[in-house]
Amino acid sequence: MIALPQDPIPLKDLSERLSKRLANFRLSDAVIKGIAERVLIDGLSLVRFDPCIYGICADYFSEKVPQLDGLAARRGVKKWEVFPYGIIDWDLFHVTIAYNVDELEGKGQLREFNR
Amino acid sequence: MACLHCYSESDPQRKQALDPGTLCAALELLRAEGYSVISLSGGEPLVYPPLRAVVERGRELGFRVTMITNGLLATERMDPVLSLLDGIAISFDGLAATHNALRVRSDAFARACGALQRLAAHGRPIAAAISLTREAIADLPDLADHLVSLGARALQIRPVARAGRARSLDETSFYGASDYARLYLVVLALQRELPADVGVHCDLAPANGLWQQRNAYAGLLGSCDRVCREDRLLADLVNPLVITETGSLKPIAYDFDQAFDVASIDGLSFERLRHYKQQDLPKLQALIGGALAALQGPNVLVDWFDHCTRLSEQSHLAADQASVG
């Protein structure tokens, strides 16, 4: 048995809007639940949610110094940035987190060639 | 129409309607109690014969008046009353096939779209109120595109409520936790995909975020003895307040359990409302306080008004069982 890498993702799927890919039930409940659990973070208000070069980039605001101790342990977090507004607004922090979302890219699915 | 999911179980055969004189008298009193917005719904508010008089009286009293309509009757003939409104929302349940099936009418979607487009073309601020069964989540991106192309400037999106006739829908119509997540993520994506001047809002919110906004209930839950409560405006304590077609005043939602009813608009008086604040408000305080405290648990997605409404039903059932025991 030979395991082949998956075919390149068809262009029409790549261009399909994020909202449509999330809305159609081809993405399983488990996948959706996994994405939501990753992007909903205690203490941070999610305000923006975009496809980006890492997968999905999300913007959050917090009125306290963000507690991001467990962030590195979360699955698929590629990077994060914290911007304190400082003298503009002492109680406002902008957090950007980039997630690698394999499920949206269809990765991890091997085709097998059965003899 | 007699929609399959109608939370108020309205249909053309039901003729019960609020007496306009009683209603307007209640509105005057409620304006003095601090309420500033009237949102007209139904059933279908455009079938209410004294609608124009009520809207005019509401505006005289200083209310902003908005309406949710299915759009069927939002034609030129209704322009004299539609022009008095500060905002109009047309209700949708999905794309044409989904919408028409739930409305049990083959032209419901086309006429709703026609009304939205006509009113938007006249420069009116038009929104779409979208209530989705679980299966209809897949319709949402294309539906949003279509409604925005017709001129909708805001989309208010929510899961279908398990209330009224909707209780008879197939169980697959209702949401589990992963369906809440799917709808929430789709709305987040739409907020970025649609034009920046189109507001896209969802009735779902993370529990964590709702807890952070708990000060919205400071009026209801703040430390305040009985005397202090009497002096507070009702709008600071109970908001929103629903007037049903039978004249009951209910907190939060149409199907909030009747054990929490505020009063009836029949014979409504400041004295009656003072009595409510003294004697009955603590029950609502306990319910909402408990619901807020529970938000400190897992950061799940919550349909807050629906959640409180279901708690009101459970609270009533628990009280019944306790009294039987």
Image (spheres, coloured by chain):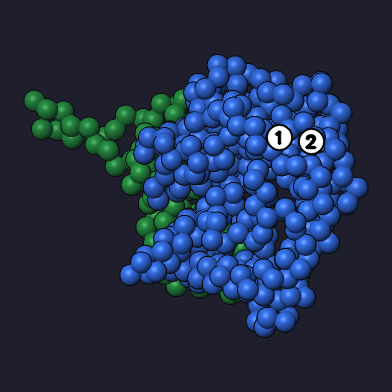
Q: Is residue A46 above or below residue A114?
A: below
**Residue at left offset 78%, top offset 58%:** B30
Q: Write down which chain is painted green.
A: A
Q: Chain of mark 2?
A: B
Element class at badge 2: helix
Element class at badge 1: helix
How far apart, in angstroms, are the residues tagged by discs 2 and 1?
A: 7 Å
Q: Position of residue B260 (x, y in %)?
A: 57, 62
Q: Which residue occupies the foreground of this view, B112 or B105?
A: B105
Q: Amino acid at mark 1?
A: Pro
- Total tally of numbered discs in the picture: 2
Residue furthest to the right in view is: B60
Asked whether residue B56 is in view, the answer is yes
Q: Amino acid at mark 2?
A: Leu
Q: Position of residue B261 (x, y in %)?
A: 60, 59
Q: Position of residue B53 (x, y in %)?
A: 85, 38
- Contact between labelled residues 1 and 2, with CB atoms less than 8 Å apart: yes
* Quadrant showing the C terminus of chain A: top left
Residue furthest to the top in view is: B106
Asked whether residue B141 is in view, the answer is no
Q: Earlier in the sequence, mark 2 or mark 1?
A: 1
Direction from residue B246 to residue A12 in the image, left or right: left
Direction from residue B254 to residue B40 in the image, left or right: right
Q: Which mark is residue B45?
A: 1
Q: Which residue occupies the foreground of this view, A56 or B219?
A: B219
